[in-house]
Each structure stands twice: as structure tokens, then as C-alpha cells.
Image (spheres, coloured by chain):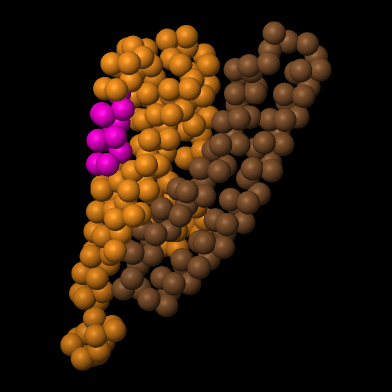
Amino acid sequence: MASETVDNCSSHDPLLDMDSLDSLSGVKSDEYLELQFRVFRLTFLLTIFSVGIAGFFWGIQASASLFIGALSGILYFRLLARGVGRLGTSSKIVGKVQLLVPVLLVLVSSRFPQLDLIPALLGFLLYKPALIIQFLSMP
Amino acid sequence: MDSITTAASVVAAGLAVGLGAIGPGIGQGSAAQGAVEGIARQPEAEGKIRGTLLLSFAFMESLTIYGLVVALVLLFANPFAG
């Protein structure tokens, strides 16, 4: 009896159709994942370009620092995206774990003499031009 | 580094993080509230709302990161240390 009621609801009322809700949810998460991948791809391209320029003009140390900073920026953005993805479903607030990434980056850069602080920070901020490009290209 | 420079650096680091986090904190709270309300009203637009929220959060949180970086540089790589 209960299964008949559920079957009737799912066949007549589109709001209670669980299959369509599941597929709709999949489309939504796909859209969100696609946005993240676009930003990651743009950040990777900017990283490769900037690391090449830095290696050519300022040497291998600045280039390595920029690369580590860019990887930290990508990690930061991934953690932020995970926090935003959980908002409203499994969490009521956006976590602050991602703020540990720049803290660790500055600590590591000041601790190891092989890394420069300024290129590492500039590399960390490389996700920002990618975001601006993405924001401008949004319909 | 003399004691006055050390004290000033520690106070400035605290002010940089504390004051720099007020504005983004308020902004992120109101943005998250609007986004969750929007998702509840229009679940079919969840992907777009979350994407816009992510971009807004990244821009807002960078202000906090600037303050954090200034504070960390003052504490661990102070340019005024003799």
C-alpha cells in the first residue's frame, strides 16, 4: 500500500519524483564541479606561464618559490570550494581550515632559506587572476 | 630587534589580523545567508548560486589573507628588525 502511494506520487507529482530530484542534484553538482575545474585549469596555465617567466628572469629559486606558492593557492582554493560545497547540506558555516595554508606557506618560506617570501606570496595569489577571468567570462 | 620594535610588531600584527577580519567576516556571513536562502527558494539554481558564492568568498577572504600575511611577516620575517 505504501509502495503504491510512493509510486503514484512519483509518477504524477514531479516535485516528489525522487529520480528527477537525484538527476537534478547531479546536474547542479556537475555545474559546480565544472566551475572549479575551469578555475583550476586557468590557475595551472597561469602557474606554468609565471614559473617560466620567473625562471627566465629571476632564476631557479624565485621560480621554485613561485611554484610552491601557486600549489598552495590551488590547495587553498580547493579547501575553500569544499567548504562552500558543504554549506547548507552537512555544515552551517564555511570552515576556516583553508586559512592555515597561507600561514604554513609564510612559516615555511621564512624557515627555509631556499624559498623566497615575496615570490611565494605572489604565487599563492595566482588563483586570483584566474578567478577574475572566470568571473568576467561568466554569462 | 629592540624591545620597542618587538612590542610594536606584535601589537601591529594583532591589529592587522583583528581589524582585517571584521569586514570580510560580516560580508561572508551575509553572503552565505543570502546564498542559503536562494538555494532554499530555487533549488534548481543551486550550482550557479554555489559557484557565485565560491567566487565571492575567494575575493572576500583575500582581504583576511592580506592582513594575515602582514601579521606573519611582522612576526616571522620582520623587515624592521635590526
The chain assigned the colour orange in the figure is: A
Whether residue B12 appears in this view of the structure is: yes
Magenta-highlighted residues: A41-51
Q: Quick one: which chain is brown?
A: B
Q: Please report the residue visible at 30 percent of the width from the left and 46 percent of the height from the top.
A: A39
* Quadrant of the image containing the N terminus of chain A: bottom left
Q: Is residue A52 magenta?
A: no
In screen coordinates, is B16 left or right of A5? right
Question: Which quarter of the picture shows residue A71?
Answer: top left
The residue most toward the front is A57
| Residue A50 is covered by the magenta coloring | yes
Image coordinates of residue A75 in percent, x first then y, are 37, 36
Q: Say if A5 sits above or below B62 in the image.
A: below
Q: In which quadrant is the C terminus of chain A drawn?
A: bottom left
Q: Nearer the viewer, residue B22 or B39?
A: B22
Measuring from the top left, give residue A131's x and y in whole percent. Answer: 36, 47
Q: How many marks?
A: 0
Query: In x, y percent, where is residue B23?
Result: 63, 51
- Side (left or right) of B7 relative to A42: right
Decide if residue A75 is in sight here.
no
Q: Residue at x 43, y 29 (%)?
A: A122
Residue at image position (47%, 67%) is B36
